Every structure is written in C-alpha cells, then in structure tokens.
Image: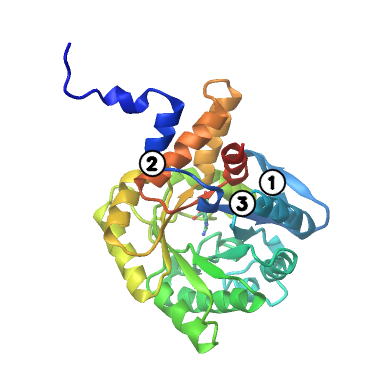
Amino acid sequence: MILQRRNRILRSSPAIRSMVAETILTPADFIAPLFIDEGENSAVEIQSMPGYYRRSIDLTIEEVKELWSLGIKSVLLFIKCKDEWKDNTGKEAWNKNGLMQRSIRAIKEAVPEMYVMTDVALDPYSSYGHDGIVQNGEIVNDETVEALVKMSISHAEAGADMVAPSDMMDGRIGAIREGLEQQHYTKTGIMAYSAKYASCFYGPFRDALDSAPGFGDKKTYQMDYANRIEAVKEALMDVEEGADIVMVKPGLPYLDIVREVKNAVTVPVSVYNISGEYAMIKAAAKMGWIDENKAILETLTSIKRAGGDLIATYFAKDAARLINQ
Ligand code: PBG
C-alpha cells in the first residue's frame, strides 16, 4: 500500500505519544473533598466509599499536609453535623464556633497556602436533609438564600478562600456576592455549582454525612438529567451574578454538559467526579473487573478533555501519586 497519511506514526512510541498528548493532568487540577467530624484522632471509613474517611480536625490537618506535599492546591470542606444541632433553619451553619468554622481556621493555620473551599448548602444542618428551609412541604427559595448568605459570610470570616454553594436555589450567587461585598470580604471567591443535576449517584456522599432527604427528592431545585440547554442558562446566569468558577456535577455521565458549558463561558469550569462515580470504580476494581489505577487516570483525563479545568475528586490523592511517579 502507498498511503498519503499514516496516523499511527504519532502513536508509535511512548515518546511521541507523550509529545502529542492534548490533555495532561497535573495535581493542581484537583480539588480534594474532605469530610470532617467532631472528635479527636478519629478516622471512620465510609462504608459505600472504601478507602475514603471522615476525620476529626486533627487528622484532617495531617491529610491536608500530605495533599499539599503531593502538589494538590485545594480542598473542599464538608462537615457532619450532630443530629441535635440540626433544625429547619440550618442555623448551626453560621455558628462562629461550628465544626466548619473551626476546621477552616485550623487548616488555614496549619497550611496557609492551601486554597480552602467550603460547601455552602443547608442539607447537613437540616432536620429534613434538604438543601433549603422547608415550609408546608416545599423548599422555599428566598428564605433559604438569606441563610446561605449568612453561612457564606461566616465561612469567609473564618478564613475560607472560596465558598461553593451547592444548593441550586435561584439568585444565591448574586446575593452571596453582595453579602460578601457588604462585609468587605472582597477576596473571597465563589465557585457556583451551576449545573447540578438531581442524580442517584450522590448516594454514598449522603451516607458519609448522614444527609439523605427525609422526605421526597431534590428535583424541585436540582436539574433534570434530561436537560442540556438549561445547564448553559444556569452557568451564564451564575457568571453574571458573580461566580468566579462554575461547576458541572456529576462528572462522567455529564461530559456533554461539561463541553457545552465550557464553550459558553469565559470563567474556569470545574467538574465534580462524585461519590457514586468513585464507588463504581472501587467496586469494579474490588471484583477484579477493571484496573483501578488505569480507570482513575482515564476517568480524570476524560473529564479534563471534555473541558473541566478543575476536578473535584475523591481520587485526588491517588491520582496525584500516579502522576508524580
Ligand atoms: C449537598 C451536596 C451533595 C453533594 C455535594 N454537596 C449531595 C446532594 O446534593 O444531595 C454530592 C457529592 C457527591 O456525591 O460526591 N449540597
């Protein structure tokens, strides 16, 4: 055969493949989610997330130091609230000495360079397990937004670099930006969960924080997974309201959305490779059906290739180690 073009030339050795690779993962791409609980010297493995732990603040700090040493620049904090502090207002969420606020201060003191992001939503603090305040069986929008503003300001006051509202209420990004400005937190950023879908893949996360909704589902605020164009609307509105970074969540089943949003906005796009995605890889690897390390790198590279500038992932530490090898 005489061929004009032989595409395999660029695939013929590891050297040429790495020279022409379009997508390169680095540890700075990752945001490491951390689950924090009360107590001391405690690390509890989450049943549906093997190898992932809920830690007390002291052990969380050790973890943060290790993440930093691996080249990971950012953590995203979630806390488990005690049942007796949960109510329908979510007021524990802006307690100056709450677990979240103490965690932020402790991490910023131990590893000041680590970029600390915090989850902003009422579900861990809600007696109903919903992301908002409940009235007559409905999740009310505007009252919830007021609570989210107080929560965001208290995270900023504790030293958070960026707040990450994951609740999907309308108008919360603008309200949070305004609240931060009024209190002179002009350096605190906002990473908006802009296109967050009502997904069955959040199950293991809700086990980790004991935050499953007590009634109904989250479909009146999180997006319908049938929709694509709506994600662009959400992302564009959040950017207009002041989002510094927009997020698409979940990750792997939503790569079309990632690309769509990436093409529509001029801010960085983050993608949340969520708990159910983690659990699926872990389970299949445990059965011997896939190679875990290869699955991790392929998954994260695919998310970046689709347009994810940042990836929140429970594989952050494993992936950083694999990349650094
Ligand atoms: C809640 C929140 C959820 C996740 C992040 N923030 C769950 C939910 O909306 O019910 C899911 C993360 C994951 O599954 O890894 N505001």
Percent from the top left, x then y, of residue 215?
50, 55
- Any part of residue 249 in sight: yes
- Tell me the SS state at disc 2: helix
Task: In the rendered structure, find residue 124 and report the number of the disc placed on it.
Answer: none
- Specify few, some or many for label 2: CA neighbours under 10 Å numbering under 14, 14-19, or 20 or more: few
Percent from the top left, x then y, of residue 78?
62, 59
Mark 3 = which residue?
71
Dots 2, 3 in contact, CB < 8 A: no
Q: Earlier in the sequence, mark 2 or mark 3?
A: 3
Which of 204 and 177 lies nearest the eye of the viewer?
Answer: 177
Percent from the top left, x then y, of residue 74?
58, 58
Gap in angstroms between the C-alphas marked 2 and 3: 27 Å
Which of 98 and 20 lies nearest the eye of the viewer?
Answer: 20
Is 66 left, or right, of 156 in this rendering?
Answer: right
- Specify few, some or many for label 3: CA neighbours under 10 Å numbering under 14, 14-19, or 20 or more: some
Task: In the rendered structure, find residue 53 and report the number of the disc placed on it.
Answer: 1
Is 305 left, or right, of 31 in this rendering?
Answer: left
- Any part of residue 280 in sight: no
Question: How was the colour assigned to the protein in this rendering?
Answer: rainbow
> In the displayed image of the protein, which residue is found farthest to the right?
41
Gap in angstroms between the C-alphas marked 1 and 3: 20 Å
- Tell me the SS state at disc 1: strand
Q: Earlier in the sequence, mark 2 or mark 1?
A: 1
Dots 2, 1 in contact, CB < 8 A: no
Which of 126 and 299 lies nearest the eye of the viewer?
Answer: 299
Q: The residue under label 2 is which amino acid type?
A: Pro
Task: In the rendered structure, find residue 253 and report the number of the disc placed on it.
Answer: 2
Residue drawn where x is 36% and y is 50% of the image:
307
Would you place residue 144 above or below residue 269 in this image? below
